[in-house]
Structure formats: structure tokens, C-alpha cells
Amino acid sequence: GLVLLGAIDEEHGSEGTQAFLNDAEVDGCIILEPTSLDLWVAHGGFAWVEIETEGVAAHGSLPDVGVDAITKMGHLLHQAEGLRQRLRLTRSFEPPLGGETMLPSLHASTIEGGREWSSYPDRCLLRLERRMIPGETQQDLERELDELLSGLALNDPQLRACWRFSMVRPPWQAEKGPLFTALEAAYRSQLGHAPGRAAGLMWTDAALTQQAGIPTVIIGPRGDGKHAVVEYVELDSVVTCARILLDTALRFCRYPR
């Protein structure tokens, strides 16, 4: 049989997919994303990290008492930029099934701190996103964060900082098998040539389905505007994609065409 799943919460905790996987008995999964009809063969993972620096609240007229948590965070951000540059220079992943070279990333997302103009801020909270490439693990990130904070503490005995994960999702890469073969054959049948293969740092529920032992591939129509005010797909490619999906399902499920 064929199961069509419209999962809730795909942009955050993936609760819909997680619930489906509790009882799922399926042999393959196709994730639909706007891939420009390319066959995605690998994507990144990510970690949302919160880092908090602790200062000492004091009136602005008491510089010998106050410790500025925001300034401490500024030093940390400078070191985080150095880490980002090192990651881009020293780590990469070449997807074995094709697609472009993948590089990890690190960026600040939000920052907040301070209470009012005339006081030393006693706390500052930074939220970071670290995009992982296949081969990187949560343990790698834990080591990076520990080393980042311990290195700062060596040069600043006043530094009080801690970090915690808010969410971690693993990278994914496709594996050749019956579903992969069926999709490529369907693509050739419908369009007369093999699909392009692509990879990138975006994340999808494919990582969860394949982690659950379900072979997974990713394809979808042409489109643009991920998380933007205007997000769209092109209707003609939606029709083409639907034909490819139908052909794939018939081949994979071994129905007569």
C-alpha cells in the first residue's frame, strides 16, 4: 500500500513524524522539498545552542563592583567567529552519491541581556546555530563548546559561562537501494534523462525516517524563498514531480504500469 503523510511541526520538533514513526511499518519514504527536481543525496544536521554569561549587577557608578556580562559575551562571539572560520577551512564532506561539497557553519541567531542603562548587566544570553555535515556528531559539538569556554576562562578569571543544547538533529545521507533505483528509473522515464544530484545544509525529517531504518530519498518541484515572506513552487514542476512520484510508487510497490 501507499501512505501519504502530511506531518505537523516539521519546522521545529518534528512531532508529527516522530509520532508516525512510533507505529510505522513502511519500506521506503520520499520527502518532498523544493529541490528543483534534483535528487537530494545528503543534507546537514543542526544544533541550537544557548550560551549564557554571568556578570555582577551593580550601579554604573561602581565599576569596581560591576562585571559586564555583555562584554564577556562579546569576547566569546569573537572566539566563535574564529571557530567558524577554522571549521570552514578544516572540515568538508564529499557526498559519495554526488552533489556539491558540504562545509559546516556556525552563526549567532539572537542575543539578549542587560536591565537598564545605568546598571552593569548581570547576564547575557546568546543563541547559536551550528550546522553539521555528515560525519559530525553531537559529541564533536560538545567538545567544541567546552574548548571554546575553557579557552576564554584561561585568559579571563572573571568569566562565568555555561552552554546547553536546545535541540540537536543529525545529518543525513541517502543510500542506494530499491527506492533510490525506482525513483531514478521513474525520472528517466518521465523526463528522458537522469536526475541531477544535490546536497546542502538544510535539514529535513529524512534524518529521522532513515534513522528509524526506513530508506529515504528527497525530491520536489522548483521553488524558492525558504522561510521568507514569499515562498513558492512553480506549478508546472509540481505536475512533473507528481508524475515522477506516481511512476516511482508503481515501480517500488511493483504494481503494473
Image (tube, helix red, strand yellow):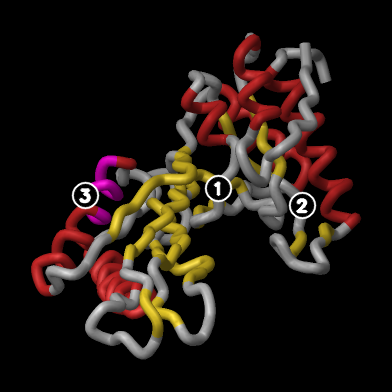
**Residue sitting at 37 percent across and 71 percent down?**
57
Give the alpha-carbon distance from disc 3 to disc 1, as whole Å. Answer: 22 Å
Q: Is residue 257 magenta?
A: no
Residue 55 location (% of width, % of height)? 32, 68
Residue extent of the magenta highlight: 139-145
Query: Is residue 216 depicted above or below 81 in this figure?
Result: above
The type of residue carrying mark 1 is Trp
Instruction: Assess disc 2: are there few (<14), some (14-19) or many (≥20) residues with their C-alpha within 10 Å of its C-alpha.
Output: many
Identity, as a three-letter code, of the amino acid under mark 2? Pro
Tell whether 157 sits left or right of 255. left
**Furthest residue in direction left, as rendered:** 154
Q: Amino acid at mark 3?
A: Arg
Which residue is more in the foreground, 96 or 16?
A: 16
> Between residues 181 and 118, which one lies in front from this camera angle?
118
Q: Earlier in the sequence, mark 3 or mark 1?
A: 3
Q: Based on the displayed image, in which of its 4 quarters is residue 96 positioned?
A: top left
Residue 208 can be seen in this image: yes
Quadrant of the rendering where the N terminus is positioned: top right
Q: Is residue 197 above or below residue 253?
A: below
Report the predominant secondary structure element of the magenta stretch.
helix
Q: Which residue is mark 2?
A: 221
- Element on which disc 2 rests: loop
Expressed as whole percent of the image width and height from the top left, the position of residue 17 reads 66, 27
Category of crowding for the residue at label 3, using alpha-carbon neighbours closer than 10 angstroms: few (below 14), some (14–19), many (at least 20): few
Distance between mark 2 and mark 1 Cα atoms = 17 Å
Q: Earlier in the sequence, mark 2 or mark 1?
A: 1
- Residue picked out by circle 1: 203
Which residue does the image show at 71% across and 53% down from the upper left? 34
The residue mark sitting in front, 2 or 1, is 1
Residue linked to disc 3: 143
Secondary structure of the residue carrying numbered label 1: loop
